[in-house]
Amino acid sequence: MGIKKIVLAYSGGLDTSIILRWLIETYNVEVIAFCADLGQGEDLDKIKQKALNTGASKVYIEDVKEEFVTDYIFPMLRANAIYEGGYLLGTSIARPLIAKKQIEIAVKEGADGVAHGATGKGNDQVRFELTYYALKPDIYVISPWRQWHFDSRSSLIEYAKKHNIAVPVTEEKPYSIDRNLFHVSYEGGILEDIWAEPPEDMFTMTVSPEKAPDKPTYIEITYKNGNPVGINGKELKPVELLQTLNNIAGPNGIGRVDIVENRYVGIKSRGVYETPGGTVLHIAHRAVESITLDREVLHQRDSLIPKYSELIYYGYWFSPEREMLQAAFDYTQKDVNGTVRLKLYKGNCIVVGRKSPNSLYNPELATFEADRIYNQKDAEGFIKLNALRLKTRGLSIKK
């Protein structure tokens, strides 16, 4: 095929460790490994050395946490994105950034192709490849899971043993883990039994609600133009803010979700997720919007959230339709300023206060007490006009 150099999205896990060696053996090419530091908390020097030991000609390790939070997570949170009512898209939003960096390295290194470790059953293959083609239409894409003879995690472990490749997965505990600064996801293995409760020792970012403190934690989050900018009156940069919230919400048992979701390829799949800080930010953002957004703007925007969330889940981050929706959502955020007070208690994140210099809430209008602004008699004509079509229909039915 004339391919001489490939940039591989490399994590150091089971799949990509084997893929690195398999690419070299199958295509007889130079393989450059790229590992994005997304806040997964792993020893990146060790991962780099492992890639070199497995045959990589060069290894790129890049800290992309600031870009990840500022340009991917925060825009997604400004849109209140949530897939199928439960998933805050922690893995979905990381893939376009990883793929973008791969393309940048491919251009810099003069590579002919890129490769990833996503299976042919999942969403990640689509997310990676749609990004590749959007940013470099002439790139050659290799997806080993759609080509090789391996058909299970067990067969991969067998190959790893044969080639002396150390892997962090065993046949006794084969569920898949993906972690970044925003969340942790768990899939496969024992989790494929959708009746079985996940084991407590699986979780890493949160404690169970039962083990959370018996006393609630109160926090205040400040927003500016739809973005969180501070906690408890202290201004924080995006990465520090998210890390701080993870450290507060996780010990309070907040952010666990266990769902069966619909993959883009048509398969139903169970995903167990931990998103402690992200869960708090989602709830807090909606609270400050509740007092700063006009009713019809809020309702129109909310009607578009399922589509926006679907675009991220399916892998269309770099699509014109996602960019169009983002522009519309961001337009609504210019007055989303203020502070939200929350109570965190045993897995619950409860809004207990909100204030904003742009608040549309008027206590004199909302009060149940006497007021001099709202004439309650005006509601009679309003109701009768809105009831006209219903009355007309009712008379028609009686005929």
Image (tube, rainbow, N blue to C red):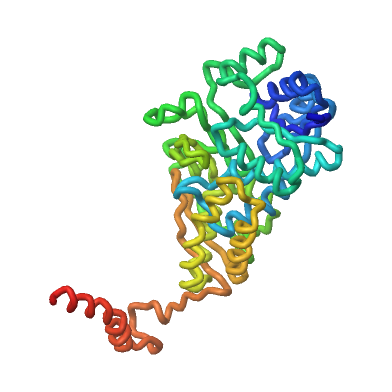
107 in relation to 355, above or below: above
Residue projecting furthest to the left? 399
Q: Nearer the viewer, residue 208 or 143?
A: 143
The reply to whether residue 329 is in sight is yes
Q: Nearer the viewer, residue 324 or 255?
A: 324
Q: Quadrant of residue 45?
A: top right
* Residue 65 horizontal side relative to residue 227, left or right: right
Q: Nearer the viewer, residue 92 or 45?
A: 92
Q: Quadrant of residue 192?
A: top left
Q: Position of residue 69 (x, y in %)?
A: 67, 50
Q: Position of residue 363 (x, y in %)?
A: 43, 77
99 in relation to 225, above or below: above
The reply to whether residue 248 is in sight is no
* Residue 323 horizontal side relative to residue 352, left or right: right
Q: Position of residue 108 (x, y in %)?
A: 86, 41
The residue drawn where x is 59% and y is 41% is: 91
The residue drawn where x is 47% and y is 53% is: 343
Total numbered labels placed on residues in the image: 0
Q: Position of residue 240 (x, y in %)?
A: 68, 49
